[in-house]
Image: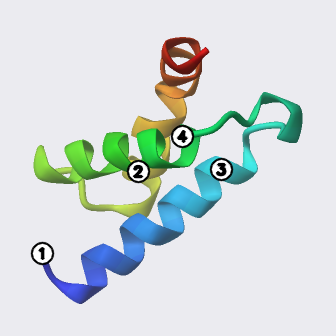
Amino acid sequence: MNLQLILIMRAALEEVMVKIPANDSIFGLKAAMAEVILKAAANGQTSFDGLVASASEQIQTVTSMLT
């Protein structure tokens, strides 16, 4: 993985975390969302917008799995 992709993934994670209301934030959520982004990147999604969209689609699923 190159540095540029890592920076894009990090920025995408931060963007997704901003979309989650503070009262919905639960322990392990950021790590789980990072995993979603890593899997999307491994499957060929490497654009910022694509990674944000992929992770955003999974917020509800991940949140429900962690509660």
Q: Amino acid at mark 1?
A: Met
Q: Please state which of the two labelled residues, at mark 3 or mark 4, is closer to the viewer.
A: 4
| Residue that carries the numbered disc 2 in the rendered image | 34
Q: Decide which of tag 1 and tag 4 comes sooner along the chain.
A: 1
In the picture, measured across the screen, residue 41 lies left or right of residue 7, that is left
State the image coordinates of residue 55 (x, y, percent, origin top left): 45, 39
State the image coordinates of residue 7 (x, y, percent, origin top left): 39, 79
Q: Please state which of the two labelled residues, at mark 1 or mark 2, is closer to the viewer.
A: 2
| Residue that carries the numbered disc 4 in the rendered image | 28
Secondary structure, mark 2, is: helix
Q: Residue at x 74, y 36 (%)?
A: 25
Instruction: Report the label total.
Output: 4
User: How far is the residue under mark 3 from the one under mark 4?
Assistant: 12 Å
Q: Contact (CB < 8 A) between labels 1 and 4?
A: no
Taking depth in this image into account, of 50 and 37 the one nearest to the observer is 37
> For mark 2, does the 10 Å Cα neighbourhood hold few (<14), some (14 to 19), or many (20 or more) residues?
many
Q: Residue 29 lies in what quarter of the image? A: top right
* Res. 1 mark: 1
State the image coordinates of residue 47 (x, y, percent, origin top left): 33, 61
Q: Please state which of the two labelled residues, at mark 1 or mark 4, is closer to the viewer.
A: 4
Q: Amino acid at mark 2?
A: Ala
Color scheme of the displayed model: rainbow
Q: Residue at x 45, y 69 (%)?
A: 10
* In the depicted structure, whether residue 25 falls above or below residue 8: above
Q: Decide which of tag 1 and tag 2 comes sooner along the chain.
A: 1
